[in-house]
Image (cartoon, grey):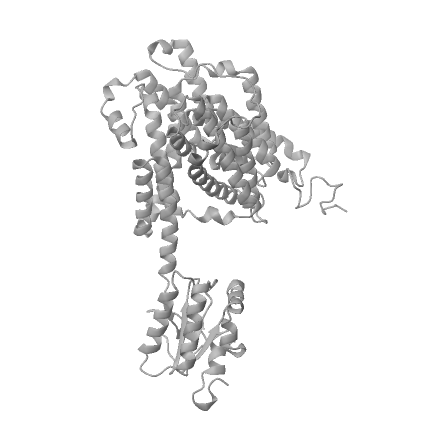
Amino acid sequence: MTNNSGSADSPFTGKAWPIFASLQSYSLQFLARDLFAGLTLAAIAIPEQMATARLGGFAPQLGFFAFLAGSLAFAIFGSNRFLSCGADSTITPIFAGGLAALAASGDPQYLVLAASLALMVGLLLLFAGIFRLGWIADLLSIPVTTGFLAGISVHILVSQLPGILGVEAPGGAMLQRMASLATHPNETNPFTLLIGVGVLAIIALSERVNARIPGALIGLALASAAVVLLGLENRGVSVLGAVSAAPPALALPDISAGRLPGLISLSLIIAIVVMVQTAATTRSFPSSPDEPPDVDRDFIGVGVGSILSGLIGAFPVDASPPRTAVVSETGGRSQLAGLAAAAIVIALLAFGAALLGRIPNAALGGVLMFVALRIVRVNQIVSIYRQSLGEFFLIAVTAAAIIVLPIEQGVGLGIALSLLHGIWSTTRARLVVFERVPGTSIWWPPSPHLPGEQEPGIIVAGFQAPLSFLNAYHFRRDVLDALQSRPQAARLLVLEATGIVEIDYTAAQILLELIRKCHADEIDFAVARLESIRAQAAFARFGIGELLGPDHSFRSVEEAIQALGKPGPAKGS
């Protein structure tokens, strides 16, 4: 009989396995698939990690170090079988913009600050995973996330245009840089432009034909060959130059305590963005269709990856949806695919670092241009515009804030807008007076397509949101309005509570006040279908159930009416 208990003599089984979770129930027949997926992942990751490092103002080998740290840590501590962790172009412009305000790119302190930031972000993610704070990933709504990605895309495009055009990178704010680039088209170097656009075209064509084709690697190889064979360095085409093959050393960043406070707000913003992207990646590519994704454990995996990245002198890492998709679509079955890709990167650094120095910067710019264009969710923007104009406004404001303001401030504003939108949605909840569907015992909100009827002296009303301080006062006003608007005095009010999943202290006090007022006015107050366990606990904790009475809570509206809705002396019996 097969042993599925997960005991010590069955190392590849067991749901509580503390490390290498993706190897649970692993079979050697999966090895060939993982190795092929790892080879494909390496072909995608090598150019992307170099380009992302350059995007942040780092040497290209630091992108490889970040990928090695993220891949190793997530394989050990993460849960998802497919997730690829490493340098990511979504968060790099954010923390690069924040670090630039503290130290110039190229200054040794810039690297120290980046490594310190990686440690802080990693510790926040580790804390979030250990204490199961996966709900934080839901703080950014889809419209705000869409606007955020559109704004980041503009930052990437503008940062890479000078290298592709072969002109000096302008300084200043984003709008100034855009204006400067637009006013100097005659200075464009045709060779760098051809390289950048050519690499972009190769990647786009490869993606269209088959996502498994390593278009970025092919483009970089062809661009490097063109530089060597045609002598393009003498025609204004800049190249990466020497790439260090020295292995990283583990060490704590040598940063003074006085500089750490400047990183606190930036680390919080980066940690939230990483949580959102990690959760989205984990949910999009679940390890098993039969089990829910373990988002919290994946936070731990990515968090340890960031900590390790900081200890070897690199920068924060993140989950990558495109690279994760590559592992999933090429048949990868575990994190061995990521480890195989990491091994290929190590071999490249050890034996092929000299080849990397002839890669033109314009080619890396073409890679990032493709990344920037891919992260803009055009179809989603159009869909939101057609279906919810107000939420399309959130996209526009978030994108504009990230483009116009310093990028970390823009992201912070986007997070604030998402929270405010959630609060506003909650405060919009209103009491709805129900009607009985004729000939049935069903009570339903009024509908122009469904005739309804009322019972004389009886009000059935529902509130379809959590009851909290955000909407409790509107709830009280709506209940009082419903009681006063009836031509015949009410003798029974039934609160249909299906939608009330939570009750906080403020709302509980107002509900107690309403029940007392109804009792004083000789109106019975009943609650039907209070299904939420948390709301039931609040009823007991705040004394609502005691004031209401044990015979005034019902499992259906009709049951409440049958028990309490009779007029005359029998009322309440």
Q: Is residue 289 above or below residue 424?
A: above
**Residue sitting farthest toward the bottom:** 569
The image quarter containing residue 239 is top left
Front residue of this view, candidates 176 and 203: 176
Q: Residue at x 46, y 68 (%)?
A: 497
Toward which corner of the image does residue 25 lie, by quadrant?
Answer: top right
**Residue 446 point in image, percent of width and height:** 36, 70
- Across and down, in percent, residue 185 comes to 24, 22
Query: Residue 294: image x %, image y %?
Result: 57, 46
**Callout count:** 0
In the displayed structure, 529 sits above or below 203; it is below
Give the left or right position of residue 165, taking residue 493 as reference: left
Q: Quadrant of residue 469?
A: bottom left
Instruction: Specify whether residue 555 is in view.
Output: no
Query: Could you tell whether 22 is left or right of 120 in the image?
Result: right
Q: Is residue 219 left or right of residue 165?
A: right
Out of 184 and 448, give the one closest to the viewer. Answer: 184
Is residue 477 something one can see in this rendering? yes
72 w.r.t. 551: above or below: above
- Residue beneath the point at 40% across and 47% down: 142
Image coords of residue 242 (percent x, y)? 47, 14
